[in-house]
Image: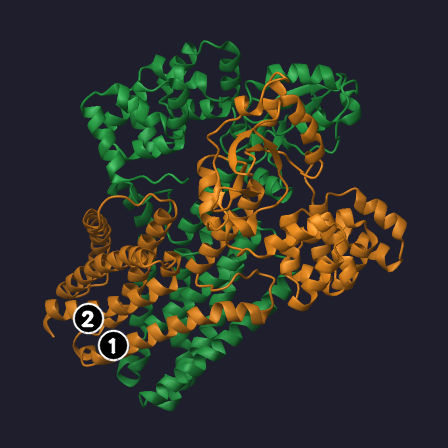
Chain colours: A orange, B green
Amino acid sequence: MQFQLTDELIEKVEILIEDQNDKELKTLLNEYHYADIAEILDDLDNEDAVYVIKLLDSETTSDILMELDEDIREKILENLSTKEIAEEVEELDTDDAADMIAELPEARQAEVISYIEDHGHRDEIQELLTYDEDTAGGLMAKELVKVYETWTVAGCLRRIRGQAKDVTRVHSVYVVDKQDKLIGRLSLKDLIISKSDMKIADIAKDNVDWVNVNDDVEDVAKVMSKYDLEAIPVVDNNQILLGRITIDDIVDVLKEEADKDYQLAAGITQDVEADDSVWELTKARLPWLVLGLFGGLGSVFIMKGFEEVMETVPSLFFYTPLIAAMAGNVGVQSSAIIVQGIANDNVKGSLASRLIKEIGLSLINGFALAILVILFGLLINQDTTESFAIAISMMSVIVVAALVGTFVPIILDKRGIDPAIATGPFITTSNDILGIYLFFVLSGLIIGF
Amino acid sequence: MQFQLTDELIEKVEILIEDQNDKELKTLLNEYHYADIAEILDDLDNEDAVYVIKLLDSETTSDILMELDEDIREKILENLSTKEIAEEVEELDTDDAADMIAELPEARQAEVISYIEDHGHRDEIQELLTYDEDTAGGLMAKELVKVYETWTVAGCLRRIRGQAKDVTRVHSVYVVDKQDKLIGRLSLKDLIISKSDMKIADIAKDNVDWVNVNDDVEDVAKVMSKYDLEAIPVVDNNQILLGRITIDDIVDVLKEEADKDYQLAAGITQDVEADDSVWELTKARLPWLVLGLFGGLGSVFIMKGFEEVMETVPSLFFYTPLIAAMAGNVGVQSSAIIVQGIANDNVKGSLASRLIKEIGLSLINGFALAILVILFGLLINQDTTESFAIAISMMSVIVVAALVGTFVPIILDKRGIDPAIATGPFITTSNDILGIYLFFVLSGLIIGF
C-alpha cells in the first residue's frame, strides 16, 4: 500500500512535463494522494513544480502546497499570481489558509486576502492571523460543528448536515448556550444512538476539556496527549467558543519540538535539514562551535598555568582529553535526563534529595571508572601515586560534572529559560574547563606540586 | 481548566486514606479525570495507591492503571488478586487489556485470562498477545465498526448503534466484503448526510489506507502522520480486516521514539526517567561512560607516543582538549543532522554530492575557527609557526570529524542498524582519538618533528 518515491517516477513526471503532455500527466498524478504528490514535487526543480501546480485543480494543489517543504512552497508561491494564491487559500481550512498567508511577504498578504471571494472565510482567516503562532489561537481552525443546548436531537442532526459539509472530520459536536459560551460536548455517536426527540442539554456531556486561545501550544499538546483527546475546543477569556485544534496539528507540534530539542542537544541552533544550503547550515552550526572553541582556549590557559608540572608529572597532560570527555559525557547524560523529566513533568521531590541521589549515582559510576583507570595504570607501568591521583581526581570531576548537568537545567527552568539549551555544547564546554581545572588542582594536592 | 497537582491535594488524599474515610475520598477523587488520579497515585506510596485502586470502581481504575508509570502499575498489580486484575481487564479496550496482561509475570498471565468472563473479549486479547509489540498487531485494538458493502444506510445506522457501544471513538466505519476483506471506508458524517435507502457500496470511499499486521510501528506512525489519519485499519496478508490503530497510540509511539533518540544522543542506553532508581540509572549510563573512558585511554596512548615533543613544543599538549572538543562537537552536529534526515526521509542526492557539501561546510566552519585560534595565538604571544600548525591541523581535524559524523550514520542505516546509535558518545569518542592522532601527526609535519 505504501507509496515509494522512485527515480523512475520522477523521471516519468519530468518527461511528461517536458513534452507538455498535460493529459497523461494529470492521469498519472491523480492516482496519488496529495501528500505523495508533494513528495514528488519536493524532488522536481522549481520550474517543473510550478508547472504541476498550475496544471492540477486548486482543490488538490492547495493540499499539496501545505505538504511541501517550507522553502519549496515559498519558491512556488513566488511564481503564482496573487489571484492564483487566493484560489488556493479558498480551498484550504482556515488554519492552513492562515498559515499559508502568514508565510507570504507582508505586501502580498493584504492583496491575497482582498482576492478571497468567500467573505466569511476571509474574516475567519483574518481573525486567525491576529494570534501568535505559538499559541492555541495560532494553531486552531474555525471549522467546527456547534449546536445550541436548546435544540432536539432531530433538529440537531438536520442542522449538522449543513455545518458538517465544511468540516473535514467531525470529532466532537460542541454545545453552547445562547451567548456562544462553551458548556458541553457530544459525539456524533451520542447523537446517532439517542432518541430523536431528546434535548441536547439532556444528552450533552458537561465535562468538556478546553484550552484558552492564549495558551502555549506545548501546553495544548500536553493536555491533548494526557487526556487522549483528538480535538479540543478553544475559548476566549469569557469562555466563548472560538475554534478547535485537532490532533494531527499536535502531532506536527510534537515532532517539531522533538526535532528542536534533539538539535539543541547536538549543538545546532536553528531548525535545519540535511538538504539546506551550506550557508544555512553554517549559521546553525558555527555559534556553538565558537563557544566550544572558547572553552577549549580556556583549557589552554588553565594548562599553561600548570606548565611547570610537565617536567615532574608529564602523564597528567596525557589524561586531559580523557578528563574533558568524561566531564562532558557525564554532564550531558545528567542534563538530558533532567531536561526530559522537566518536559514530562516527572521531576519530583526536593532539590536536596535530588542532590544526594545525583552524588550517589555519580560516585558509583565514578568509582567503577576509577578502578578501570587504576588497572590501566598498572598495565602501562605508571607510577602508583600518579594513577591514584588521576583516578581520584577523575572521580571528583565526574561528581561535579553530574551536579552541574543536573542543576543548570533546573535553575534555567526556574528562571523561565528553556532548559533544553543546557544540554549539549553548553554543558560540555563548561564541564571541560571546570573538569580540567579541578583535575590539575586535585592531582596537585595528592601528588604534591 | 488545567489540573495542577499540589502538595495540599496529595496530603488531603493521604489523610483521608489514613482515616479510612472512604466516602469523602470517593467524592473527592470522582471530581478528577482518570489521568489526573493517575498523577495523584504516582505520588502516593504503594500501599495508599493500592487502597485507592481497591476503593474505586473498576470502570475508572482500569483507566487509571493504564495511565500510571509502568513501575508503579507493576507494584500495584502485585498487590491485586488474579481475579481483581481480570475485572480491570474486562473494562479495558482490547489493546490496553493485552498490554496490561503482557506486563504480568508469565505464570499469572494464563490465570488472569482464564478469569475473563466475556469470552469474545478474552479471545480477542489472546489474539493480540500473539503479535510482536513493535508491530501494527501489537498496537492495534480489536474494537472497530465494520459494515458490509451490501447493507443500506438505514440498516447500517441501526447496526452501528449496536457495535458502536463498545467503541470509545468511531473514527471511520470500515466497509468489508462478505469474506471480511477490507474494501473501503465511510465516516459517520457520510452516513448521516446520505439518504437512508442508499447502498453502502455506493457511498463508501474505496481509497482506504491500511497497514499490514506485521508492519513496524514506526512505519505505521509515518503513514498516519503523513496522511493526517486519525485511525488506520490493520489487515492480514489476505487483506482481511483484523483491527485498527488510533492516533493517540501513535502520539505515544512518537514521544517514546523521540525520547529514545534524545537519550541515545546523550549517551543513555535504556529508557530511564529522572526518578528511576540509582541502579537503573547506572545501568543506563555506565556503558557509554566506559566507552568514553576507553576512548580517553586511547588518547593517553597516542600522546605518550609523542612524549618527546613535550620538550620542544609543549603548547601542543595544551590544545588537546580543544581539539578533542571540536572533533566531538562537529561530529555530533553532522551526525545529528543526518540521523534526523534519515528519520524524516529527506536525505537525498548521491553520496558524492553529500561528500562535497560536507567538506565545503566543514572547511567554512574550520576556517572561521582557525582564524580565531591564530588571533588567540597572537594574544598570548605564541610562536607563529606553532599557531599556524595548530590552526591548520585543527581545520583538518574538523573536516575529518564532519565526514565521520556524516558517513557513519549513513553506513549504519544502509546495514539496517539504527543510525541514532551513532550520535553522541560513539561519534565523540571515535572522533576524539582520531582527532588527537591527526593533530599531532599534522602539527609534526608542519613544525617538523
Does residue B396 appear to the left or right of B375 in the view shown? Answer: right
Residue found at x 51% / y 57%: B408
User: Which residue occupies the foreground of this view, A406 or A97?
Assistant: A97
Location of residue A251 in the rendering, given as x and y in whole percent from the top left corner:
54, 44
Q: Quadrant of residue B46?
A: top left
Determine whether the residue tagged by mark 1 lies in a helix, strand or loop: helix
Which residue is the site of mark 1? A303
Location of residue B200 in the rendering, given as x and y in whole percent from the top left corner:
76, 22
Query: Is residue A63 in view?
Result: no
Determine whether the residue tagged by mark 2 lies in a helix, strand or loop: helix
Vertical placement of B295 versus B124: above or below?
below
- Residue type at mark 1? Met
How many marks do you count on the picture?
2
User: Which residue occupies the foreground of this view, B311 or A193?
Assistant: A193
Location of residue A7 in the rendering, given as x and y in whole percent from the top left corner:
74, 53
Does residue A98 appear to the left or right of A238 in the view shown? Answer: right
Of all chains, the one bearing label 1 is A
Does residue B411 appear to the left or right of B79 in the view shown? Answer: right
The quadrant in which the N terminus of chain A is found is: top right
Which residue is the site of mark 2? A440
Query: Is residue B327 in view?
Result: yes
Vertical placement of B106 versus A283: above or below?
above
Q: Residues within 10 Å of mark 1 (few under 14, many from 20)?
A: many
For the residues labelled 2 and 1, say whether their Cβ atoms are less than 8 Å apart: yes
User: Which residue occupies the foreground of this view, A23 or B425?
Assistant: A23
Q: Residues within 10 Å of mark 2 (few under 14, many from 20)?
A: many
The quadrant in which the C terminus of chain A is found is: bottom left
Residue B396's disc number: none
Q: Do pointers 2 and 1 mark residues of a single chain?
A: yes
- Residue type at mark 2? Phe
